[in-house]
Amino acid sequence: MPLTTTTEMFRKAYENGYALGSFNVNNMEIIQGIVQAGQKLNAPLILQVSKSARTYAGHAYLVKLVEAAVETTGLPIALHLDHGPDFETCKSCIDGGFSSVMIDGSHLNYEENVALTRRVVEYAHAHGVTVEGELGQLAGVEDDVRVSAEDASYTKPEQVQDFVGRTGVDSLAIAIGTSHGAFKFKPGTKPQLRFDILEEVGRRLPGFPIVLHGASAVPQEFVAEINRCGGAMDDAIGIPEDMLRRAASMAVCKINIDSDLRLAMTAALRKHLAENPGHFDPRQYLTPARAAIQAMVEHKIERVLGCGGKA
Ligand code: G3H
Ligand code: 13P
Ligand code: ZN
């Protein structure tokens, strides 16, 4: 069974008011934890790989692991490049078996973003691969790029029809106040998302799938557990899950989650090693770490995404 493209996944998600989870993967245990959750809840999945994940694990290892996930479960699974930085990286993923890519030209000026995105779309569509573009800029850290809150910018709804029309993208990531990483809001401030922008974008692009990056909720119990077991993660604040659920019921069809998986895995690892100082077999500490990933993804599917039973 081949990898799935996102076209049909997004059509069903849009029509039925749910979203797909797009989970960042770097190694076998993360992939297995996510896929076990998808299998248990019969949920379609997007597994996404950043440039630095490709550098860390190697393209071929990640593709083969995701192919193994498809073969073992029979679930609809898309393999997606997260934050493709340039044409060459997108081309390499398209040529190398991915079913979806993101070209992130959000840091470029508008016309440069259009031109780069259009170039990737032409190549991707000729190879049966779908493309996500981005308009507006999120705050936070991704790969080596750090965007400060001051430099972040909300998506301008008046640009989205022109951008989608001229580039031919299959989905669009927008900036409405989410941000990458675990430190999304200043302590003491109230997390807020610009639902007015999402509504206006949805009105201007009826039926078109919107993507939300930086959508981890940063559960405080995981932060506390990490701190209790020797970590230092003060002031980590995420997006309230009610807001994400609301976005999923609107035009948002893909919600990107990485930090919450990192937190779940790190909390489980730290706890296991703190309670079992004699353990040195990786299988001993990676078993609870993988189970923590699974539990987190099950929680997201049921509480935030609403895609359980939709495989
Ligand atoms: O948006 C970025 C993702 O969280 C991936 O992060 O570049 O550290 O793999 P990474
Ligand atoms: P988080 O850091 O909120 O998990 O966002 C991940 C993301 O947007 C990956 O593209
Ligand atoms: Zn992102």
Image: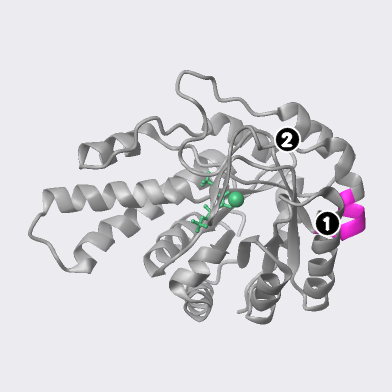
Q: Which mark is residue 154?
A: 2
Expressed as whole percent of the image width and height from the top left, the position of residue 260 reads 44, 45
Q: Secondary structure at mark 2?
A: loop
Q: Amino acid at mark 1?
A: Glu
Residue 65 part of the magenta segment: no
Q: Quadrant of the C terminus?
A: bottom right
Query: Residue at 87% across / 53% down in the picture?
Result: 111
Q: Residues within 10 Å of mark 2 (few under 14, many from 20)?
A: some
Q: Nearer the viewer, residue 52 or 270?
A: 52
Expressed as whole percent of the image width and height from the top left, the position of residue 210 reads 74, 46
Q: Main secondary structure of the magenta part?
A: helix
Above or below, 73 relative to 111: below
Q: Nearer the viewer, mark 2 or mark 1?
A: 1
Expressed as whole percent of the image width and height from the top left, the position of residue 66 reads 51, 73
Q: Quadrant of the N terminus?
A: bottom right
Left or right of 237? Residue 208 is: right
**Would residue 298 be seen by someone viewing this image from the given angle?**
no
Q: Amino acid at mark 2?
A: Tyr
Expressed as whole percent of the image width and height from the top left, the position of residue 84 reads 65, 63
The magenta segment is 163-169
* Residue corresponding to mark 1: 112
**Would residue 156 be seen by someone viewing this image from the given angle?**
yes
Left or right of 276? Residue 215 is: right
Q: Secondary structure at mark 1?
A: helix
Query: Residue at 69% across / 61% down in the picture?
Result: 102
Report how far apart the C-alphas of labels 2 and 1 lie in the structure. 18 Å
Q: Residues within 10 Å of mark 1 (few under 14, many from 20)?
A: few
Q: Which mark is residue 259?
A: none
